[in-house]
Amino acid sequence: MGHGRSLFIYPDTPSSFHSLLQDLPLRSQSRGDQHSCRLPRVHEHTQGLQSNTHSCSPAGLRSDMSLHSFGLEPLSCHAWNKDRTQIALSPNNNVVNIYEKKANEWVKTEELTEHSGRITGIDWAPESNRIVTCASDRNAYVWTRKDGVWKPTLVLLRINRAATCVKWSPQENKFALGSGARLISVCYFDKENDWWLSKHIKKPICSTVLSLSWHPNNILLAAGSADLHCRVFSAYIKDIEDKPGPTAWGAKMPFGEVLLEHKDCGGWVHSVSFSPAGDQLAWVAHNSSISVADATQGKQVTQLNTRHLPLVSVLFASASEIVAAGHDCCPHQFTFKSPGSLEFVKKLDMTKQTSKGSMSAMQHFRNLDKKATEEDEKDLNTLHQNSITQLCVVSGDKSKVDKYSSVGLDGAMVIWTFKH
């Protein structure tokens, strides 16, 4: 009957019922389709312009979680302003929407529409209040708010493939951008010519750069890529900053110097994150593994192969606690204390208590005949009803995260309280 599914028909079933079953549309059992069938209950609050987004309160929602729906479209990336009263996010298209928190609602205040391709990265600098965006159109823009309006400045990236990720440096005097051109663009502002320039880190990258993370010293840059490698580079630009001192990762740091290259990540490296002090680096790969390299112990790498679906975003919640999330639709907590001691702790999500009785085969077909639908027993017992795409710190910092946010393909954002 197509769709990779089949129905068993009892021999004594009337032929007219056979033909009825043939005409029934089979619903996809993918997580995305399930969610699209449930969301209209929340979407009723956002009829019309869809600029106002309300918080949702599912039964059993704990007080340390808050769920916010931004419509039906997947959320590919997001970023917060300094005081966390505004959020910039992209609904998987070429537009960045900026929402402001008013009472219990997120109200859309502005749209950034300069890109012509799907937005792949957003980062909001807290001190300078500048937003950097990148997209599949091979462009990046730095947005500055002047006279109450966000004005874009085009960055000279010099790439011939889609941009994939972007991150401001801790001092906000430069940013790094990954792309499908097998290189990293480190961009900085040239005051003499009044534009954003870029320098390229090319070797030894052999495939698309998927993730980036800055070291606290504003010099070192970690990158995960689709060539199954995780690397740490020097992104020192002598034109705009002083010569850096030695670190646990190395002492010589000319631009593009490779200080770590781990070749056995086991899959695409979806996300990387430096620890609060910068002495450890965590990353997650498409083979459902999470790894940590410790520069204080000879850059020794500890890898944990989990039993979960692949994780796609990771961040440090403290010096020894790590949060990661991905295709399991809920955050997972890990601990790392020393090489060889990377451990899974727990899932950081509520569990919906549901009771479902058994159903006979004939009752199953009666439901098909009466309702023209099948009983949906595939509800996920997580707040997110589809894969999580990104995690961000909401309050606190990497040394002690108090709250963090997650966005997913279900069009929802969840704010979580981390209990240390």
Image: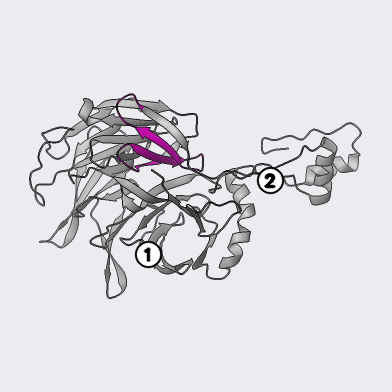
Residue sitting at x 77%, y 37%:
358
Badge 2 is on which residue? 27
Look at the image and name its color scheme.
one colour
The secondary element bearing badge 2 is classed as loop
Relative side of 290 to 4, left or right:
left
Residue sitting at x 20%, y 57%:
196
Quarter holding the N terminus is top right
Q: Residues within 10 Å of mark 1 (few under 14, many from 20)?
A: few
Q: Report the amino acid beneath label 2.
A: Arg
Relative side of 28 to 90, left or right:
right
Foreground of the two, 275 or 327: 275
Residue sitting at x 34%, y 32%:
336
- Give the quadrant of residue 269: top left
Does residue 183 lie above or below 292 as drawn? below
Residue 264: in magenta span: no
Q: CA distance from mark 2 to mark 1?
A: 40 Å
Does residue 83 lie above or below 377 as drawn? below
Q: Nearer the viewer, mark 2 or mark 1?
A: 1
Q: Earlier in the sequence, mark 2 or mark 1?
A: 2
Residue lying farthest to the bottom in this orientation: 147
Residue 136 visible, this orientation: no
Badge 1 is on which residue? 85
Locate residue 151, reporting x and y percent: 29, 68
Locate residue 65, reporting x and y percent: 49, 52
Tell me which segment is drawn in magenta.
313-341
Q: Report the amino acid beneath label 1.
A: Thr
Residue 326: in magenta span: yes
Locate residue 118, reporting x and y percent: 41, 53
